Amino acid sequence: MKRRHFIRIWDLKKEEALGLINRALELKRNKNWERKFIGKILGLIFEKPSTRTRISFESAMIKWGGSSIFLSSKDLQLSRGEPIKDTARVISRYIDILVLRTYKQETIEEFAKYSSIPVINGLSDRFHPCQVLSDIMTVIEKGKDLYKDKIVWIGDGNNVAQSWIEASALLGFKLVLACPKGFEPEEELLKEAKEIYKAQIEIVNNPEEAIKGAEVINTDVWTSMGQEEESEKRRFAFKNFQVNNELLKLADPSAIVLHCLPAHRDEEITEEVLEGHQSVVWDQAENKMWLHMALIEFLLER
Ligand code: CP
Ligand code: NVA
C-alpha cells in the first residue's frame, strides 16, 4: 500500500479524521493498548522551538513501545546546504515515521515527496494540522456539538486558524473567524474551502460580532514564530481582539476557551480567562499526546 503523509487536514477523508479523533478519545479513556511498535523509530526534525508537540509525539511513540530521535535542523547537514531530497531519502532508510516543524510549508512538501516513510506536519507557516485534530477532540470531549454549537476563532488568520478552516470544510461544521483587517487567512484557501468543500466559513473584522452566542472560542498568539519583527505592529493591530472577561461575557455562558499554547498573557488572552473556569487549555494540551498516538498508529498501519 502507498505510504500516507499528514501534511494538512485535507490529506484525510472525513471518516479518517473522525476515526482518528475517536481512537484518541478511546486510548485516553481506556488506557489500554498493545505495545505494538517495539523497534519502530519516530524521528523529529524541528526548525523552531516546541514544548508540547515535541514531547507529546515522543511520549506517544514510547507508549507504543517504540523509540524517538529528536534533531534540531541546525544539527543536520541540511544546515550546510545538503538538499532536502537527499536528506529525505537517507532518513527514510533509518527510521519509520517523521515529524517536521518548519518555517515554509514547501520544506515539508519537498521532504514528503522524496520520503518513503510517512511525514507529519508538526507546524509550518501555513498549517498546524495535528493541533487542530486534537483541539476538535477536546471540543467533543467537553460535550460540545460541532454541528450545533457556534465555533469561533478570534485573532490572527494564522497557521492554526488555517487548519481550523480546513477542518471546518472537511468535517462540514460552521466556523466564524474574527481577524483584524489585513490579518485574515489566505484568500485562495478560503476560495478552495468554499468551492471544493462548500464550506460555511464567515470572516468578520469585529470580535464582538463573532463571539456573540459562541460555545467554542479559539485564540492564538498575535505574533507567530518567525514573525518577531512584526510584533510591535501586530500588538497595535490586534489590540481589540484580546479574549478577556468583557468579550467573553458576550459568548454563551457555557462557552469553552481553547488556546494551543504557548500563551502571551495580556496580549491575546488575559490571565483571568486563561486560568478561569471556562478555559480548557490543560486538557487541550494533554490531548495532543492521545491524538498523536492515534495518528502514529494510523500512519504506521497503512
Ligand atoms: N501548541 C504547540 O504546538 O505547542 P509547542 O510549540 O510547544 O509544540
Ligand atoms: N501560531 C503559533 C502556534 C504555536 C504553537 C506559531 O506558529 O508560533
Image (tube, helix red, strand yellow):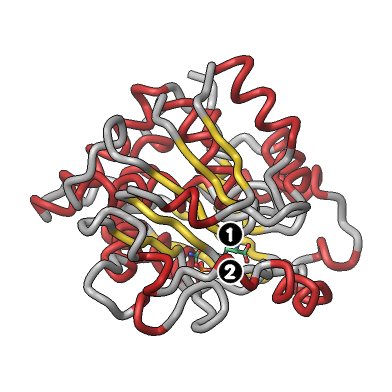
**Picture mark count:** 2
User: Looking at this rendering, what residue extends furthest in the right direction?
Assistant: 81
Please state which of residues 16 and 293 is positioned toward the viewer in this rendering. Answer: 16
Q: Is residue 176 left or right of residue 172?
A: right
Q: Residues within 10 Å of mark 1 (few under 14, many from 20)?
A: many
| Residue 184, above or below 233 | above
Let me know if residue 108 appears in the view: yes
Please state which of residues 241 and 15 is positioned toward the viewer in this rendering. Answer: 241
Q: Position of residue 13 (x, y in %)?
A: 44, 22
Tell me which residue sits at (40%, 23%) in the image. Answer: 14
| Residue 246, above or below 117 | below
| Contact between labelled residues 1 and 2, with CB atoms less than 8 Å apart | yes
Q: Which mark is residue 237?
A: none
Which quadrant of the rendered structure holds the C terminus? Answer: top left
Tell me which residue sits at (22%, 44%) in the image. Answer: 144
Q: Position of residue 49 (x, y in %)?
A: 61, 74
Q: Which mark is residue 221?
A: 2
Q: Describe the element under mark 2 as helix, strand or loop.
A: loop
| Residue 150, above or below 57 | above
- For the residue with label 2, is its CB less than 8 Å from the closest atom of ligand 2? yes
Q: Position of residue 200 (x, y in %)?
A: 50, 26
At label 1, the amino acid type is Gly
Q: Residues within 10 Å of mark 2 (few under 14, many from 20)?
A: many
Q: Describe the element under mark 1 as helix, strand or loop.
A: loop
At label 2, the amino acid type is Val
Counting residues from the start of the chain, the first of labels 2 and 1 encountered is: 1
Q: Is residue 174 left or right of residue 35?
A: right
Badge nearest the viewer, 2 or 1:
1
Please state which of residues 44 and 181 is positioned toward the viewer in this rendering. Answer: 181
Residues at marks 2 and 1, CA–CA distance in whole angstroms: 8 Å
Let me know if residue 98 appears in the view: no
Mark 1 — residue? Answer: 155
